[in-house]
Image (tube, grey):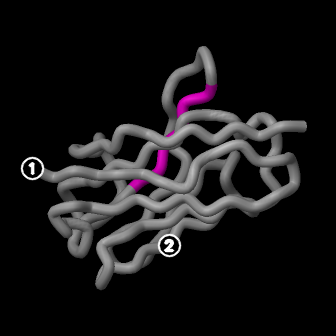
Amino acid sequence: QVRLVESGGGLVQAGSSLTLSCTDSRRTFTNNAVGWFRQPPGKERVFLAGINWNGGRTYNDSAKGRFTVTRDNAKSVVYLQMNSVIPEDTAVYYCASYLRPVVGGRPHYWGQGTQVTVSS
């Protein structure tokens, strides 16, 4: 069974940078798109950024300019670089993989999430 694991979350100060990682225990990332989602306290989980099998990227407006999604297929890892974080970025961050090479529709596998808390 595919198991996605996020890491890199924690407590950071506003204005700092943070990199989240998502690893795939079954190394199924290579041909599939992967997305990052987040769920702020008391709110719904929303799409943040996604990366296709060939590196093509898609961003939500809230992520454009500050967040960058990258992937290393050799290591089966997808990253989310977060720069200039603000308190509104506080959320549980999830990665999810699609059963298709490009971002779209509903992801199939989800990680357990990693908490990011930004202090002002």
Reply above or below: 73 against 36. below
SS state under label 1: loop
Reply above or below: 58 against 39. below
Secondary structure mostly seen in the magenta stretch:
strand
Residue under the point 26% across and 53% down: 98
User: Residue 32 falls in which quadrant of the image?
Assistant: bottom left
Q: Which residue is mark 1?
A: 1
Question: Which x, y percent locates residue 120?
Answer: 90, 37
Reply above or below: 95 against 55. above
- Judged from this view, the residue extending furthest toward the bottom is 74
How far apart in space, not on screen, are marks 2 and 1 (Cα)?
A: 24 Å
Q: Which residue is mark 2?
A: 70
Question: Which x, y percent locates residue 87?
Answer: 81, 36
The magenta-colored residue range is 35-40
Q: Is residue 101 left or right of residue 23?
A: left
Reply above or below: 24 against 4. below
Label 2 vs label 1, nearer the camera: 1
- Of mark 2 and mark 1, the one earlier in the sequence is 1
Q: Is residue 38 covered in magenta?
A: yes
User: Residue 68 falls in which quadrant of the image?
Assistant: bottom right
Q: Is residue 33 left or right of residue 66?
A: left
Residue under the point 24% across and 45% down: 109
Q: Is residue 109 covered in magenta?
A: no
